[in-house]
Image (cartoon, coloured by chain):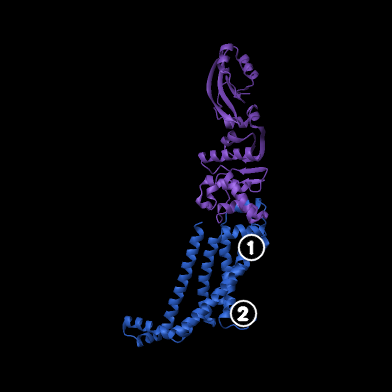
Chain colours: A blue, B purple
Amino acid sequence: MTIPALTLASSADSSGPAGAVADFVLAWPAMWPDLWLATMDTVYMVWWATVFSVLFGLPLGVLLVATDRGGLTPAPAVRAVLGAVVNVGRSLPFIVLMVAVLSLTRFLVGTTLGPTAAIVPLSIGATPFFARLVETAVREVDREVVEAAHAMGTRRLTIVGKVLLPESLPGLVAGLVMTVVTLITYSAMAGAIGGGGLGDLAIREGYQRFNDHYLWATVILLIVIVQACQSLGDLVVRRLARR
Amino acid sequence: MGMVHQHFALLSSRTVTGNVGFPLEVAGADRARRRARVGELLELVGLGDKARAYPSQLSGGQKQRVGIARALASAPKVLLSDEATSALDPATTDSILALLGRLRDELGLTIVLITHEMDVIKRICDSAAIMENGEFREAGRVLDLIGTPGSLLARSLFPIPEDGGSDTVTVTYPRSVDEPLISELTRRFDVDVNIRGGGVERVAGQSVGRLNVDVRGARRAEALAFLSERGLLVEEAGQ
């Protein structure tokens, strides 16, 4: 039923493709307050989810490397457990994970609706993702450099802070950008269960109320935001890698 | 003890100054002392102008100089050099060895040098130990080793043909010899000497040689005894 209805809605208020584009552009001022609020909600969700993902994912990723065979503190059992936890997190589709952690969200935030509530599943979904990217980046650090630091009597925590993290910084930043972009798409999914933000707007106005203009506007805004993040990230990575 | 690595093992995220200062930073030295010491060390290895460069902007030899400066940061008595020149081209190897030799003399360092390049032993080693399959095969002062019968070191330093006949002897000069011994040999003992191969190398400050010769004649045994008396090492084929 949706498809014919959508087609009807767009053909009713336009005369040909050019007219449709003109209508769309003219509709922006009226839509803007909604779009702006939704964008701010998305930024708010993604920002805090990124903060928590880095807070938990960075140590988790470093631990995955450190506890591995030949790592700083080899501990196969610990690594097996951490690896399993990360894999569980990675194997759940985000939309399922969101529903699965609803009771935890209610416990932590007091509600399961709105952008603040969405931060919980977003953080849980992105933490293992970022942890794997951290693991890959840290693993790239030259073993000889780590051994050299070890031979100089550097303590393990100092090796992490002064060798592993600075040496893998370009890879870490690239992983961070990938995580932010993933969080933006996740946050749009969070809209499906009342998380707020651009995804929520697209589903409520665009899908459920057949308002194409809202749908296209959110698509454009999401593309612009993702592009901006990626370009900024690439710039930083290039700066760091030039050393 | 300081350590120099084959592949330099420098931190790519730090400048030359940051790399050399790393061991001091880890040991808890404050910024002012670090800066002074790093400046000193960079002058010592001839990199005073590269303090702000990143390792990726340096050549292999320059990187190894940074590695050496870093190894010296904590003023060690012993420097362990693990194949420090193995990743470098011959000219750069020469300059690094010259630097190590100079540091040894100026700072009174003991340098333990791990290498598979025999040339390096000739250039700067006083003593050597040869390892094979995880075991020490021979050890001692380089010149003593060369003067030892059946020395692996002598054989690796002077690659000469080993496929002589029954008349063939290998004569080793374990120190500088200025006398014309071979011509004296032919005159005094009336033997024929045919040189099959040989070499003279500068080892630990001495001209050391190894000759592979056929010695034929009635007084062959006397001739060989004469060479031994003069301090030469005579090894007959098949013995």
**What chain is tagged by disc 1?**
A
**What chain is tagged by disc 2?**
A
Examine the rendered structure and indicate whether residue B24 appears above or below residue A88.
Answer: above
Q: Badge 1 local density, few (<14 within 10 Å), some, or many (20+)?
A: many
Mark sitting earlier along the chain (1/2): 1
Mark 1 touches mark 2? (CB < 8 Å): no
Instruction: Give the secondary structure at mark 1.
Output: helix
Observer-nearest residue: B112 or A12? B112
Observer-nearest residue: B235 or A22? A22
Residue position marked by numbered label 1 in the rendering: A63
x and y, in percent, of residue B54 in the image: 53, 53
Q: CA distance from mark 1 to mark 2?
A: 26 Å
Examine the rendered structure and indicate whether residue A99 appears above or below residue B122.
Answer: below
Are labels 1 and 2 assigned to the same chain? Answer: yes
Q: The N terminus of chain B lies in which quarter of the figure?
A: top right
Three-letter residue code for mark 2: Thr
The image quadrant of residue A89 is bottom right
* Observer able to see residue B210: yes
Q: Which label is found at residue A105?
A: 2
Left/right placement of residue A104 relative to residue B50 reads: right
Tell me what residue is drawn at x 49 percent, y 57 percent. A242
